[in-house]
Amino acid sequence: MDDLRYLLRVLHRMGRSIRRRLRRTWHARRALKFLLLVVVGVLFWAAVRRYISSELVDAAFWVAVAVLGIWAGVRVGSVVKRVYLYQRRLRSRDSERFFAFSYEATLEPHSEQLHQLALQTLREAETYLQTTLPSRLGLVDIITEPLARIRRNEPTGYSGWAQQETESITIVYREDMDALCRTFLHEWAHIITACWNEDAPALFLEGIAEATEYHGSPTTAHSYALYFLHYFPTYSLLFLLDEARFRDQELQRAHYAWAGSFTLYLIEQFGLVRFREFYTQLRRGEEDCAFQQVFGMSLGQAEMLWREYLHTQLPESVRTETLQEVLEHRLRWAIMDGEGIVVVQALSGQMVQARPDYWLGYYGRAYCAFWAGDLQGARQAFEQANAAPAQSDDDLRGRAWFECGLLYDLLRMHEQAVECYQTALQHPDYEDARYAYHARANRYLATPYDYAERYRFLKELQGTK
């Protein structure tokens, strides 16, 4: 009986989904364009029949039918192949709560743990959102990234997704159990909140899912949002009501972070019951009206209060740590992108002030001094970077050691240069040939770097651009 109720719910939801999509298509005037194309096609066909012999028309018709048949066959065959490859690698187990619980065959040793995690996170999401789902839900698939690419026929870029019409979720497996748990919570939130409103705008659709994902650590969600606000301070949440803009791949991480933090802020300030009332009333194009009716202020006003909260009311340690993270990433990018001495010098000064124990700010100063021709100033800054208590083990740190070796060679201090080259080789190299330094470090161990070599390399680098 539970399975029958589930199937009836799916049919009902799919009907509503088709109706919504047809309505959106009509409002977007796509239906009118389609009808216009049909009319043009009919008129063209009538003209062809009138002015071209019937034999040629029939031949052209059957050629078109054959081409369309081949095209459709290739498309259908591709889909059938992907479905076959996908299903062949899945295994399933019995589950009282799910219509089917499936997982990739390679995950067989973890099947019971994953099943329990799915049930646990479902209960946790239901408790947080104060909404209980029916006793029988749809499909749960847990797969690895390669199989996810087969399923969607493209790189996914997502750690999971939900199909609200069938009350089903797909999770991309990761060994990090905390991250996996958060992904389950996120996708279950989509299934649960579809009971509130099946057509919410992306800002709040993903916002409540992110809020559920981080409900146990809201400060983390707020710190992510603050991080991206430092980079894009003028970007408004109002833009994120638009689905296409929200899904922009270049800014999607920022959009998800802002949506989750803003939704958490509303729940913290007004409570879940009031947010659910607003979510239930949401209609595309009428978001601000619903917002004012429930919260007594405009969406723009609430956004400004949220920004003030992030910049002034988060714990000072969180704000300081976020700012330091922004400074570090911004300085790294400025050095790698060659943004100029003025920018790198300013960021390096801020980095040294914020984290005097960290190597990166001193390396930024050494970078600027070196390219300004101040070799002694660069040497002093490099030595400060090398002596800093807090180091890192990444490709930029290796490059810094390598450049320190170049400086020592130019100062005719080859023994010190060799130590720097050897240390640089212990760090990972860049894949991009313009920044790779391992091969050069090995060469300069035996043959010291000098101005002639510097000129030769810079000339070679210019030729590759």
Image (cartoon, rainbow, N blue to C red):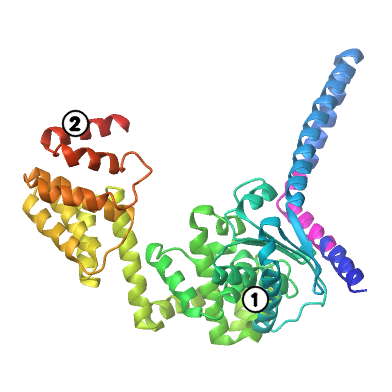
Compared across the picture, whether 82 is left or right of 240 comes to right
Residue at 70%, 52% in the rendered image = 28
- Return the disc, 1 or 2, that comes first in the chain's sequence: 1
Identify the residue under disc 2.
456
Dot 1 falls on a residue whose secondary structure is helix
Of residues 295 and 441, which is closer to you in this image?
A: 441
Identify the residue under disc 1.
290
Task: Tell which tag, 1 or 2, sits nearer the viewer.
Answer: 2
**Residue 223: image x %, image y %?**
43, 74
For the stretch drawn in magenta, the main secondary structure is helix
Compared across the picture, whether 459 is left or right of 13 comes to left
Residue 248 in the magenta stretch? The answer is no
How far apart in space, not on screen, are marks 1 and 2 (Cα)?
66 Å
Q: Is any part of residue 53 visible from this angle?
A: no
Question: Which label is found at residue 464?
Answer: none
**Residue 355: image x %, image y %?**
24, 71
Residue at 20%, 66% in the rendered image = 388
Segment colored magenta: 15-33
**Residue 198: image x %, image y %?**
73, 68
Q: Is any part of residue 96 visible from this angle?
A: yes
Residue at 77%, 36% in the rendered image = 37
